[in-house]
Image (tube, rainbow, N blue to C red):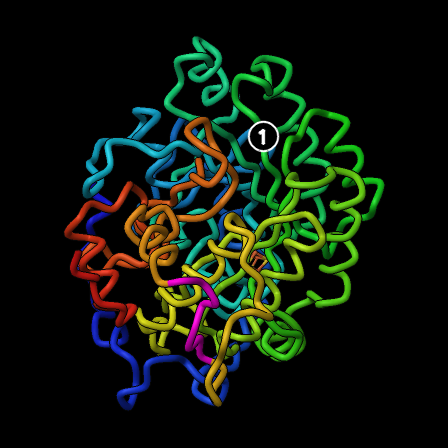
Amino acid sequence: MSCHKPEVETATLNARDGLDHNPFAAMQPRAPARTPDALRNGARVKSNDVIPQGVYLPNYNRLTPNMRSPEYVQMSTAAAITLGIMKGQMYRCSCTRCLNLLLTYPEGCRANCAYCGLARHREAERDYADRNFIRVDWPAVPLDMTIDTVARDPGKSPFHRMCISMITHPRSDEDTVSVLKRWTDRIDPSAIPVSILSNPTTMTRADVKRLRDLGADIFTVALDAATPEIFERTRGKGVQSPHSWQKYWEILLDARDIFGPQKFGAHIIVGMGETEREVLALVQRLVDLGGHSHMFCFFPEKGSLMDHLPATPRDQWRRVQLGRYLIDYRGARVEKMSFDSEGRVSDFGLPRDQLDEVIDAGVAFRTSGCPGKFAEDVSACDRPYGDSPPSNIASYPFQPNKRDIGKIRRQLRIVERRH
Ligand code: SF4
């Protein structure tokens, strides 16, 4: 097993009609099909009722066991390889620094986000624990076994952070608390800090506070969409999904109050139809509130309602990656940047030598997320190849080398300066 999968979607990596960005009109999701009643709510898994035995590796030729959090969690392929429960190699990475744990239930996530491989509309086609998510499989593992392995020597663990990813499910709030408690009972959160990737739709301010009081370090909200219109179209009524922009912001602002500066953030997917000006204005708003943005490059996830759409062209993505890094970590401001008539960055508002220094340092083009132990601007959550294939990397899960920087410069169309 490797993260270096052959790609069937390669054609969609190129912008449509020669465009160097994904405009709103081109990014309309498909409408979800109706799931037959007999297949709803994990009915197949519950009626087969196969008793789980240890680790479950997604396998479409076997009956999926009946697994539930908090006893079971799913983890990314990268985390499973790092933990030693799956064999495999990742292109140019020896491990991941973040143990991403995803809550799991036969009923799965009850939301229907258009870009997501875990969405509810897939019920008829694939059981929840077998669905691909950010381009990889997510093995299901007993939580206690995972904690036992890490608790043997947390100080020497390859993981710099653990993250609990909530999903939209009636049990998700309580089970997130249970997973956090079981973890912090055995593993000192100062050795491996914990982040929460929240599900605002089912949460209250009191839930946010409870997670902070139990030792969570950082709280993030997956806004994913950069504008209310894109949110509604991809995560709200547009796809029969329960989320609302207003509720997500309510919980985000609760997190700002409760977790405090630098301890909250938002996920944003770039290239679902927003302009570069819009997404960088959102990044600025988050920084002005005291938080950070964690960026993902849109990729057409197989089986999702957007799997027919083009991935974000690399020039759009690189401009936003660079702009976001400058705002988040170098004190730049969106008002000082210039944009063309289509909202694309035409000037970052910095002297050329300063811009060159940031580009050459390469950190701006690494995966963004909650920090690990290396530096504040280097994410523990490196999500190897979660938003691109290794053949055309969007978020670098490692430090880009000189050759990578040359490629990034060509994508940015900012040529190397001759000294
Ligand atoms: S709430 Fe999260 S896990 Fe559920 S469909 Fe939406 S993006 Fe996917």
User: Percent x, y for residue 221?
Assistant: 64, 52
Q: Residue at x 36, y 46 (%)?
A: 363
Residues shaded magenta: 344-351
The image shows residue 235, relative to residue 52, as above or below, that is: below
Q: Nearer the viewer, residue 87 or 321?
A: 321
Q: Residue at x 46, y 62 (%)?
A: 323
User: Percent x, y for residue 209?
Assistant: 80, 36
Q: Is residue 231 magenta?
A: no
Is residue 303 in view from this perspective? Answer: no
What secondary structure characterizes most of the magenta part? loop
Which corner quadrant of the image does residue 150 belong to?
top left
Q: Nearer the viewer, residue 172 or 309?
A: 309
Q: Is residue 349 magenta?
A: yes
User: Percent x, y for residue 240?
Assistant: 64, 74
Q: Residue at x 30, y 85 (%)?
A: 16
User: Percent x, y for residue 300?
Assistant: 37, 69
Q: Nearer the viewer, residue 104 or 260?
A: 260
Q: Residues within 10 Å of mark 1 (few under 14, many from 20)?
A: many
Q: Secondary structure at mark 1?
A: strand
Residue beneath disc 1: 194
